[in-house]
Amino acid sequence: MNIFKKWQNNENSEGKRLFALVIGALIFPISIPAILVILLPRVDKIIGIGSFYVGSVNIIIGVIAIIMGGFLGLWTIIAQIKLASGTPFPMLPTKKLIIVGPFKYCRNPMTLGTIIAYSGVAILVGSYTALLVVVIFSLMLLVYLKLIEEKELEMRFGQEYLEYKKNTPFILPISIVKVEKDHKQEK
């Protein structure tokens, strides 16, 4: 965990952050969707799985999800750059805890946007294998957030993060716990 502290204390130039974002742009919004669109529907055919593509329904749902997820992801990146001189990458982390913008609604808006956008891509092409890969990728991201990133943020930001964590939902902007708590208070 000390490596995270070291990364936070490094001075990262704007050029270094921009380079990381360009590399990230080649991977996350280009390469992974390309795999979902080109490779995985072929895997469906090879292993004899049909498609759930039914035409305009897939297009409408898929495009809406891609736009929503992409908007949320972009909003998150802009917040990290502008408000905390950081990036989404652990090696070039934010210099302070962000609790405004998309982070006001959930602690992990980038992950939420990623899951929504990739799900949209899988729905758009109607590939069961692509959808399965998105589910597995999403579960891996969520496990990483819970087991590593939350501990890292607590170490870097201490009580400020613990308070934020207590008051802000993990991934879904609507907290079931808060709804239950509000319901109990009404009784």
Image: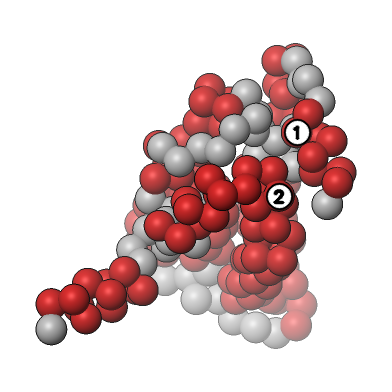
Q: Residue at x 60, y 76 (%)?
A: 128
Left or right: 105 as drawn, with respect to 92: left
Is residue 182 depicted above or below 63 in this figure?
below
Colour convention of the picture:
secondary structure
Mark 2 secondary-structure assignment: helix
Q: Residue at x 71, y 49 (%)?
A: 155
Who is closer to the viewer here, 80 or 166?
Answer: 166
Expressed as whole percent of the image width and height from the top left, the position of residue 165 reads 50, 57
In the picture, residue 15 is in which quadrant?
top right
Dot 2: within a 10 Å radius of its alpha carbon, few (fewer than 14), some, or many (20 or more) residues? Answer: some
Looking at the rendered structure, the kind of residue marked 2 is Met
Expressed as whole percent of the image width and height from the top left, the position of residue 4 reads 80, 43
Is residue 156 depicted above or below 115 in this figure?
above
Looking at the rendered structure, the kind of residue marked 1 is Gln
Residue farthest along the left direction in this orientation: 187
Residue 155 shows which numbered tag? 2
Mark 1 secondary-structure assignment: helix
Who is closer to the viewer here, 107 or 78?
Answer: 107
Expressed as whole percent of the image width and height from the top left, the position of residue 114 reads 56, 52
Residue 156 shows which numbered tag? none
- The tag earlier along the polypeptide, 1 or 2, is 1
Residue behind mark 1:
8
Who is closer to the viewer here, 29 or 165?
Answer: 165
Q: Residue 3: in sight, yes or no? A: yes
Q: Residue at x 41, y 37 (%)?
A: 100
Left or right: 20 as drawn, with respect to 101: right
Expressed as whole percent of the image width and height from the top left, the position of residue 93 reads 70, 35
Is residue 41 depicted above or below 20 in this figure?
below
Who is closer to the viewer here, 154 or 134?
Answer: 154
